Image (cartoon, helix red, strand yellow):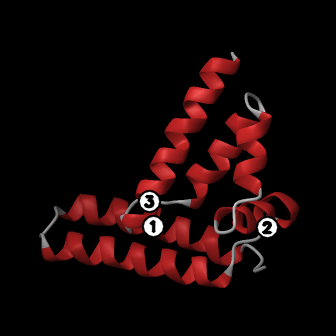
Amino acid sequence: MRILYAALGLLALGLALIGVILPLLPTVPFLLLATFFFANSSERMHNWLISHQTFGPMILDWNERGAIRPAAKKAATVSIAAVFLLSLILSAPTHVLIIQAVVLTVVLTFIWTRPGS
């Protein structure tokens, strides 16, 4: 199981790193997932991740208080708005826009109801 968790941790970390570059892919959920997998497979990788200068504070904020930093909330909001705007520009079917609007509204509600750090 340790090998499977380590592989899943590396996959989640890779997706998180891609998410840093691509605004449509979330970073923090994949970091949290990587943290979970590394906690169960590699103490060294887990410690590296939570002590990382950039990623560590976000992970600790979430683990300790379920908090999302205001800058991350703003970035998520801009990304979500950009995705929805892109769907409008590309003339997505109405049913897709409705589903997208509902899901994105739920996601934004969750994000903005979390405490800030």
Kindly identify the amino acid type of the residue bearing the numbered disc 2. Answer: Asp
Please give the residue where the numbered disc 3 appears in the rendered image.
19
Estimate the x, y position of residue 94 in percent, counting from the top left: 20, 65
Q: What is the x, y in percent for residue 18?
A: 41, 55
Q: Nearer the viewer, mark 1 or mark 2?
A: 2
Q: Which mark is residue 65?
A: none
The crowd level at tag 2 (other Cα within 10 Å; few <14, some 14-19, many 20+) is some
Q: In screen coordinates, is 97 left or right of 72?
A: left
Q: Secondary structure at mark 1?
A: helix
- Tell me which label, 1 or 3, sits earlier in the chain: 3
Nearest to viewer (mark 1 / mark 3): 3
Relative depth, front residue between 58 and 111: 58
Give the residue at x 69% y 78%: 69
Q: Locate residue 75, reporting x and y percent.
A: 50, 79
Could you say whether the residue bearing mark 2 is in a helix, strand or loop? helix
Which quadrant, please, contains the C terminus?
bottom right
First of labels 2, 3 by sequence position: 3
Query: Relative to the observer, which residue lies in front, 45 or 27?
Result: 45
**Relative to 25, is 31 on the left or the right?**
right
Residue type at mark 1 is Leu
| Label 3: element kind | helix
Compare residues 62 and 113 and report the one nearer the observer: 62
Q: CA distance from mark 2 to mark 3?
A: 19 Å
Residue 104 — which label?
1
Give the answer, above or below, for where 59 lies relative to 71: above
Instruction: Determine the image quadrant of residue 5.
Output: top right
Residue kind at label 3, given as amino acid type: Gly
Q: Which residue is mark 2?
A: 61
Give how far apart the Cα atoms at labels 1 and 3 are: 17 Å
Q: Position of residue 98 (x, y in %)?
A: 32, 65
